[in-house]
Image (cartoon, grey):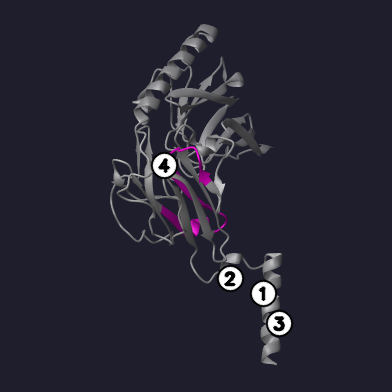
Amino acid sequence: MKKSIRKLTIISLSLLLVIGLIPTSVMATSDPTVSYCTHVQNVGWQDYVGPGKMSGTEGKSYRLEGIKINLDAQGYDLGIEYQTHVQNIGWEANTEKGWSTSNGFSGTEGLGYRLEAIQIKLTGADADKFNIYYKVHAQNVGWMGWAKNGEPAGTAGYGYRLEGIKIVISPANEDPPELGSGTAFNDATIPQFKEAYKNVVYQLFVQNGKTYGYSQYACPYSLFDIDSNGIPELFVKKGISEANYEYVIYTFENDQAKFIGTTNGGHASLFGKTNGTSGELLLRMAHMGYQQISEIGYVNGEITTNMISNEELPAGVDYFKTSYPVPWAYARDTSLLN
């Protein structure tokens, strides 16, 4: 009789999971964990190591060339995505390769290209319950500080190789197992992007002025890191009036500003979903009781616009906004780029 009851209970729980009445995280019994391996110069692929262990080498000056990260979700609704900054290629998310997922290969093999930086993030409904921490050993720097949840770790603009890495997942309310200070990411390109963007803003201001007439209100601009690589994209609004404004968008690549697309800017404002400087970006166009909300992305080197709502608002209802309006300034005000 007891065996029959237990069997019936197991079958019932299985059915509830299948039809979605019990979240998968309810059935989780242990915290999620990761294992990972790296492809190392003069060594090849190493064996997988567990959470917090070093993969790579120390004291041999061997470059990391590739990495695989395996997620054991332990029943939680979790996924993992990661990308590396590769010599002669840059961030993989800006190429056709894009982000890698669990046990996928990030980097190169047989080309002799060094990894210079990495980003790792958790995805899925339970992602906010955990932090994924990672730290790297970089040439001429040594062990750097912990990065987490998609932040870049390593260097950019120096040509330094990664030599080792440690990764661990912790509950959201816990610190990483090895507390330590230090910068997780050193970026030599930051002063360069500011100067490059200043020139773009000035040139668009002059171009707009010759076409439509100069004004202190011409060409307001914003900075927002839509690919979360540590360097923001530049959004410049240009045109003759609100009705025909458009955002002209640039990124910083190969030591120069690069045009990557446009999107509608008429009666428009930019908002971040979780903060005003990086992450997911929303575009609101609102005028005379109508509003349209779109998600702005940067995929395979191109700007994407995905409309998520288009509606007429009832009288007395305010236009959509989040708590994270993206800061902006007029073209003659370079404070955002100083």
Residue type pointed to by label 1: Leu
State the image coordinates of residue 218 (x, y, percent, origin top left). Answer: 48, 16
Residue marked by disc 3: 8
**Disc nearer the start of the sequence (2/3):** 3
Span highlighted in magenta in the image? 106-133
State the image coordinates of residue 262 (x, y, percent, origin top left). Answer: 58, 25
In this rendering, the answer to whether 280 lies above or below 26 is above
Callout 4: SS: strand
Residue marked by disc 2: 27
In this rendering, the answer to whether 254 lies above or below 59 is above
| Residues tagged 1 and 2 counted as in contact (Cβ below 8 A) | yes
Label drawn at residue 117: 4
**Disc nearer the start of the sequence (3/1):** 3
Spatial separation of the CA atoms under disc 1 and disc 2: 9 Å
**Disc nearer the start of the sequence (3/4):** 3
Label drawn at residue 13: 1
Residue type pointed to by label 2: Met
Spatial separation of the CA atoms under disc 4 and disc 1: 44 Å
Q: Quarter of the image containing the C terminus? A: top left
Task: Categorize mark 4 by other alpha carbons within 10 Å: few (<14), some (14-19), many (20+).
Answer: many
Q: Which residue lies at the image location 39% right of the left edge and 43% below the top edge? A: 63
**Disc nearer the start of the sequence (1/2):** 1
Callout 1: SS: helix
Q: Magenta stretch containing residue 60, yes or no?
A: no
Spatial separation of the CA atoms under disc 3 and disc 1: 9 Å
State the image coordinates of residue 201 (x, y, percent, origin top left). Answer: 45, 19
Quarter where residue 140 is shown: top left
Residue type pointed to by label 3: Leu
| Residues tagged 3 and 4 counted as in contact (Cβ below 8 A) | no
Quarter where residue 17 is shown: bottom right
Name the front one of labels 4 and 2.
Answer: 4
Q: Magenta stretch containing residue 132, yes or no?
A: yes
